[in-house]
Amino acid sequence: MIGDRWGVSDGEIMRSYPCDDFVSSPALEAWRGVGVQVPSEAVWPWVAQVRLAPYSYDWIDNLGRRSPRELLDLPEPHVGEKFTSAGGRRLGRIVSVDPGKQLTGVIMGAFMSYVLVPQHPDTTRLLFKLVMQTNRWVARGLSVGDLIMARRQLLNLKLLAERHRLAPEPDTTM
């Protein structure tokens, strides 16, 4: 299907994702991935912070409100909690979480998993998969739309994790 893959290898497509447990025979499957040049423990807080904002094109899906560019002191996500927020509205719910490894949520019947795969000591693959039971025509449109938005989201999360990790630690000796 057009738009079903971006930035992922065949092996990353073949692996199982937590969202697969919630939809049997999905009409829509879409995979996204990005390499992040920091360890997974530096990426996870940004993934967990998706609960606050979409981190994609804020002018589209967040009514112009800017997604936070600094990490906030959030507790670990838990099942049943709201999954994300857009335009000031809380959306979906978390259906599965393994802190530091994966976050899976559902919004309007679309299940999506963010999976962190540690690579070399300072590199992480941030993978995303979307599955949904819908008709073929809706699946095609959603796949292309998700490609645009999820690609931007993953690139923003990558940028923020790398920038935050590279920022010098404040001097607390004064």
Image (cartoon, grey):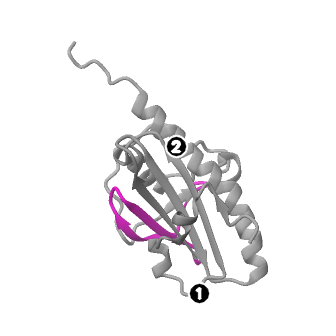
Q: Residue at x 40, y 67 (%)?
A: 81
Q: Where is residue 72 in the image (x, y as percent from the top left)?
A: 39, 42
Q: Is mark 1 on a helix, strand or loop?
A: loop
Spot the residue most to the bottom.
24
Q: Can residue 108 be seen in this view?
A: no
Q: Is residue 171 visible?
A: yes
> From which residue to which does the magenta span run?
86-109
Spot the residue most to the top.
174
Residue type of the residue flagged with mark 1: Ser
Nearer to us in this view, 4 or 102: 4
Nearer to us in this view, 149 or 65: 149
Picture quarter with the N terminus? bottom right
Residue where numbered disc 1 is placed: 25
Residue where numbered disc 2 is placed: 158
Q: Position of residue 74 (x, y in %)?
A: 35, 50
Nearer to us in this view, 123 or 59: 123
Q: Position of residue 164 (x, y in %)?
A: 43, 33
Q: Do the residues labelled 2 and 1 touch (CB within 8 Å)?
A: no
Q: Residue at x 66, y 63 (%)?
A: 5
Total labels drawn: 2
Residue type of the residue flagged with mark 2: Lys
